[in-house]
Image (spheres, rainbow, N blue to C red):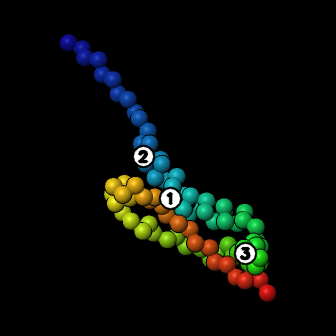
Amino acid sequence: MKQNLFIHSFPDFLGIQRLSYLWFLAFGVRSSVNKFPTFIKFKGEKYVINPEKYFFQLPEFTSTDSKLEDLTYCLSIVLQLKKDL
């Protein structure tokens, strides 16, 4: 008796998304930051952005707490600014 054998090869979508996100954190953020203008004006003061000096600020709440309390769950990027003299 011959049985039909169906083999499906589905891509690992979660793995693809994870790799894409890790690539963005490693290379895409730096590329995006480099596209920012070098000088910005804030409250009448002129500041210089240092695109090499940035870091990520971890979320204030856990994902579970954010969901339960209807809060935003986000990873913030912090850029270094220097006041232009």
Front position among marks 2 and 3: 3
| Residue marked by disc 1 | 22
Camera sees residue 80: yes
- Residue 70, relative to residue 11: is it above or below? below
Left or right of 75 in this view: 65: left
How busy is the neighbourhood of tag 3: few (under 14 within 10 Å), some, or many (20 plus)?
few
How busy is the neighbourhood of tag 1: few (under 14 within 10 Å), some, or many (20 plus)?
few
| Residue marked by disc 2 | 14
Q: Amino acid at mark 1?
A: Leu
Element carrying mark 1: helix
Q: Quadrant of residue 24?
A: bottom right
Residue at (62% x, 73% y) in the render: 79
Considering every residue shown, the one lying at the far top of the view is 1
Report the quarter where the C terminus lies.
Answer: bottom right
Pick the front one: 13 or 72: 72
| Percent of width and height locating residue 53 | 62, 77
Q: Which mark is residue 41?
A: none
Distance CA(mark 2)–CA(mark 1): 12 Å
| Residue marked by disc 3 | 43
Q: Amino acid at mark 3?
A: Lys
